[in-house]
Image (tube, coloured by chain):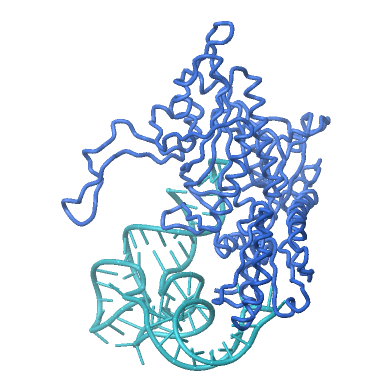
Amino acid sequence: MSKGITKRSENYSEWYNEIVKRAELAENSAVRGCMVIKPYGFAIWEKMQRALDDMFKATGHQNAYFPLFVPKSFLEKEEEHAEGFAKECAVVTHYRLKVNPEGPGLIVDPNARLEEELIIRPTSEAVIWNTFKGWVQSWRDLPLLINQWCNIVRWEMRTRIFLRTAEFLWQEGHTAHATEQEAIEETERMLGVYADFAENWMAVPVVQGAKSPNERFAGALETYSIEAMMQDGKALQSGTSHFLGQNFAKAFDVKFTNKEGQLEYAWATSWGVSTRLMGALIMAHSDDNGLVLPPKLAPIQVVIVPIYKTPEDLAAISEKVDPLISELKAKGISVKYDDDDKQRSGWKFAEYELKGVPVRLAIGARDLQNGTVEVARRDTLTKETVALDGIAGHIENLLAEIQANIFRKALKFREEHTFLVDTWDDFKARIEEGGFVMAHWDGTGETEEAIKTETKATIRCIPFNSVEEAGKCIYTGKDSAKRVLFAKAY
RNA sequence: CGGGAUGUAGCGCAGCCUGGUAGCGCGUUCGCUUGGGGUGCGAAAGGUCGUGAGUUCAAAUCUCGCCAUCCCGACCA
């Protein structure tokens, strides 16, 4: 295997695949379309989960768990929902295998056919609303604020590790409310939580907005999303929040008695983010040397590499390093002291760079003499020699600075690749180059479809902060009241 | 499901056209060397060439079937 990795400018998708592999985040599995998330990659996902889970709890939600299997009759109940997911469902038809009587191996036992097929959940609205029926009777039972962490299966034709796999991990929030207004507020609140997480934890700036009807979740009245820009200028939908109206309450007969004693259908929301966020994290920050991680999500925030020849040298270094490790840990900083003699220091430098560790300290005989340590930061690839005295505080500040810096960098990149466009020729040219294009649209699905066919760009969202501004549709020239966000998307 | 390609050592590949002892790089193991950016040298281990059939004295190589994977399209968080 060559030591360098493919450059972003040469082949962006190859670069992405190599980062995933070389940083040991995940690998393709023996099972078509499914990935193995490796320990280092999973550690990042766990940090994401922890932060998100805390945010869900802080907004009043509780975790629960619902079955992997969805009876086909449940999935059928909400018609649009069923239609939307039908094409990508894995179906369980039998419950037993048996030894092949005519040869080696096992066969599906034809006598063990299920009376009703079970669908492996592509999402859990159906099972959950079937359950909610039993949980909701009175206005006092509302709001019902539930979240679950689980895996789901969507049988994709073409898969890409983290970005689109047949099986993936996610979190799905499902809530029931007494009023439409309350449900809409919840939908907005949770999109806000996602935006907060993306920007303040992942350091990925996002555009919040509403999906066009074409791009809406099957069964939703309104879908909101956060859209992030990757370094190739393409958009990645990084989280969605849906206002489901009373569709599921009606489909599953979830009614409650309001304060006036009348029966009403409950109002629903659902919202989710998935392991796709790992893809966003990689593609937003990493460079031609490997992964770049925001300190807040890095499994290892600081690595310390001793430079030594003899065991005596190492002992002298460790004597200085040990108290520093304690001090860093006391500040809640995760630190790894890599005194492993199996690899050389130069090899370690390259390896931790590849894995995106935000700060690397190197300490050798020279430093012991001078009372210093070499501090290297991953985001800028710069090094400085700093006095060992007071280094813990310095590192703490440095981690915060790195977190802020990679956000700034990503935001600057997005701003430099976002364009206001008013003519169709400009539109095609800008989309071709990559980036976000803010343009007027006549509001029809037909126009959206035509633009997609001609340019591969879709409406990523109608941004919440889009100002009212009279204009003409980029494609048809019809009147438009505001600009929407167009881009090619993952 | 349409179009294209690939399957040879743990990984990345050459060999196939023109059939005749299975090779290279990385990694692995051992020894020495080196140690502030993937050290250098030497030795060694490791493959029923995706699979099944056929042609042939002889098949990684030619023919046919099957399987799997990847890329490009239609579908998608």
Q: Residue at x 64, y 80 (%)?
A: A313
- Above or below — where is A201 with respect to A355? above
Q: With A133 as the anchor, is A7 left or right in this view?
A: right
> Where does the image place residue A193, in percent across and percent down from the top left?
67, 37
Relative image position of residue A208 (x, y in whole percent): 71, 37
Q: Where in the figure is residue A459, as x and y percent of width and height?
A: 68, 39
Q: Quadrant of residue B74?
A: top right
Q: Classify A161 as above or below A462.
A: below
The part of the image, by quadrant, that contains residue A397 is bottom right
Residue B56 x %, y %: 25, 81
Q: Write the residue at 78% across / 52% down.
A: A408
| Residue A446 visible somewhere in the drawing | no
Instruction: Depth check: give the residue in front, A332 or A287.
Output: A332
Report which colour depicts chain B. Answer: cyan
Q: Colour of chain A?
A: blue
Instruction: Out of A146 and A73, give the one closest to the viewer.
Output: A146
For the point 67% across and 43% down, the residue is: A197
Q: Is residue B57 left or right of residue A335?
A: left
Q: Closer to the camera, A289 or A385?
A: A385
Q: Is residue A448 above or below residue A294?
A: above
Q: Is residue A17 visible?
A: yes
Where the N terminus of chain A falls, by quadrant? bottom right
Asked where in the image residue A466 lies, by quadrant, the reply is top right
